[in-house]
Image (cartoon, rainbow, N blue to C red):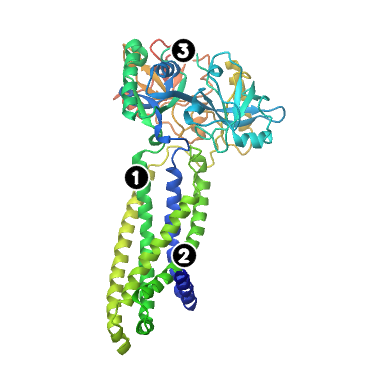
Amino acid sequence: MHSLLRDLRSGFRLLVRAPGLAIFAAVAIALGIGSTTTIFSITHGFLRDLPFHEPDRLIRVYRDHVARNRFNISLNAHEFQNLRDAQTTLEGLAGFADYDMDLAGAEGRPQRVAAAAVTANSFRTLRVQPALGRGFLPEDERPGAEPIVMLGHRLWQDRFGADPAIAGRTVRVNGQQRTVVGVMPEDFQFPYKQALWIPLELDASAEPGGSRRIRAFGRLREDVPLEAARTEFATLTRRLELAYPASYGEITTRVVAYREDIVEPSDALLMNIMVAVVAFVLLVACANVANLLLVRAASRDREVAIRAALGASRSSLITQNLAEALAIAALGGALGIGLAQVGVTLVDRAVADQIANFWQRIEIDATVLAFCVALILAATILAGLGPAFKATGVDMNEVLKDASRSSSLRLSRFSRTLVVAEVALSCGLLTVAGLMVKGVLIQTASELDFATENVLTARVQLRSESYPERLDIDRFYGELLDRLESRPEVLSAAIVTRPPGVSNYMRPFQTESESYERDRDLPWAAFAVISDDFFRALDVRLLAGRSFSAIDHAESEPVAIVNERFARLYFPGQDPLGRRIKLGALDSESPWRTIVG
């Protein structure tokens, strides 16, 4: 250790004598380590494992309807309860439904928070206990149970001043008084970025095929493989199909590992490939530094020969050369960590709101720092080992006789080899970068069909307690639009239930020209309810027909507007204008709507 520290001090002294080389080499290494560490931080942040006990035993349960091309569908309440009560391969089947809710304490304005209704066994399935108070009990999810709420740790601190006596206090959640029963541990925000939880009320009399959706998950029993759960749930789903063919016909249940539901193996592979691609930058930098060190070694070959003649072993000479490379790599690594911190901060600011899960954080943590140290050591070996062996492998007698011939010839050959390696690595890097750029251009080649500049969006959710009647809701939105449009900076304002780019709300429908025997035969389509100026606000021009206007109201003939793809699929070779469609099942009381645009 003493000799290593001595060599390191010697290496730093040599760099001080050649500041130009030191700065250039350190910057090259810094760019390589900084870019590689940044991409690794992003990859590591997205690929973090679930922060729960034995995460490999956690699973998700979905239903698929292949005939309708619908996948990853949440279970309905009737289906969930049947599967939960009948299954034996899981310690328990839990479920949740995520919402935004209004929270109000004894004083202060309501606060909009991300919330979730969870089954009583959810926290137990995750092996997480409240940091304060008690968890949910089975009786808490029964209809008519006392309204209670569980607070998140940060919400408890920010909104309630970390009051240790918070349990037992009442707060208003969506206008309803609820008793606080506990506070969850710090950094727990399951399932996504939730700040409070209420019991998921389950009614044993839920109807088959109901519209209420529950996202199901569970924990495999000890020594029960995933395939066993898949087989069992397939059997249970088949029983449901036989018992309720109208509701569960052609439905399949899919059980997947929770971690694979978050990040698919193909996505994980792609992210790791990105790290490998960016590592090419570090390899090119190492080749550059190796060439610099080789040139520097050539200028010192007589010094090395004299030291060898005085008894210095080749290993000690190699160690000293490596110490110089380590000094460069350490300096470059320090600069690289600084560059990576800047890059990680910029990326985190750009995508933080788009990261769904609370444990997926883009940051420089202990794992990233360990990776950076490994890069420094790798850079030391890659940049320093070859020049060290070459510089100490020359014939010392020849060097002492003629310092300009044999050593420079051998070193120049190695230098040319490094140049060839640099060119090859650079070509490979440029090729991969070109392919990635081409892929991005292909993805972004088709412009959006609506305006995005100077378009602002806001979410509004009205509680049924405050707006119980449809007329109250219509009056609110009408007044909201009037106020917005009266502002001089607003050109147009509109309301939509599902804005473009947000997950679609699918509904079955029927066309007047087709006949359907069963609900399962109905086609499905995404739909949204819009106000008159929706297309004008997004600068969208209709291909045919007209847009909605003041003549379209509750008492007028129901109308609809469809897109070009819908018309091509369901009215091939025909003019869709004037055709009629109806949303809902076969027995739906929804009116027939005439297509006007």
Mark number, residue 269: 1
Position of residue 223 measured from the top left corner of the image (x, y, whole percent): 35, 29
- Up the image or down, 180 lies above or below 239; here it is below
Please name the amino acid that badge 1 sits on: Leu
Position of residue 521 measured from the top left corner of the image (x, y, whole percent): 32, 16
Residue most extreme to the bottom: 401
Please name the amino acid that badge 2 sits on: Ala
- Residue tagged 3: 206
Q: Secondary structure at mark 3?
A: loop
Q: Is residue 441 visible?
A: no
Label 3 or label 2, whichever comes before in sequence order: 3
The residue sitting at 48% across, 54% down in the picture is 369
Marks 3 and 1: CB-CB under 8 Å?
Answer: no
Q: CA distance from mark 3 to mark 2?
A: 65 Å
Q: CA distance from mark 1 to mark 2?
A: 30 Å
- Up the image or down, 57 lies above or below 65; here it is below
Please name the amino acid that badge 3 sits on: Ala
Q: CA distance from mark 3 to mark 1?
A: 42 Å
- Up the image or down, 349 lies above or below 595; here it is below
- In depth, the one of 451 and 109 nearer the eye is 109
- In depth, the one of 60 and 550 nearer the eye is 60
Q: Secondary structure at mark 1?
A: helix
The quarter of the rendered structure image containing the C terminus is top left
In the shown orientation, is residue 456 left or right of residue 239?
right
Closer to us: mark 3 or mark 2? 2
Mark number, residue 445: none
Mark number, residue 330: 2
The residue sitting at 49% across, 58% down in the picture is 337
Position of residue 412 measured from the top left corner of the image (x, y, whole percent): 29, 77
- Up the image or down, 72 lies above or below 202; here it is below
Label 3 or label 1, whichever comes before in sequence order: 3
For residue 407, which quarter of the picture? Answer: bottom left
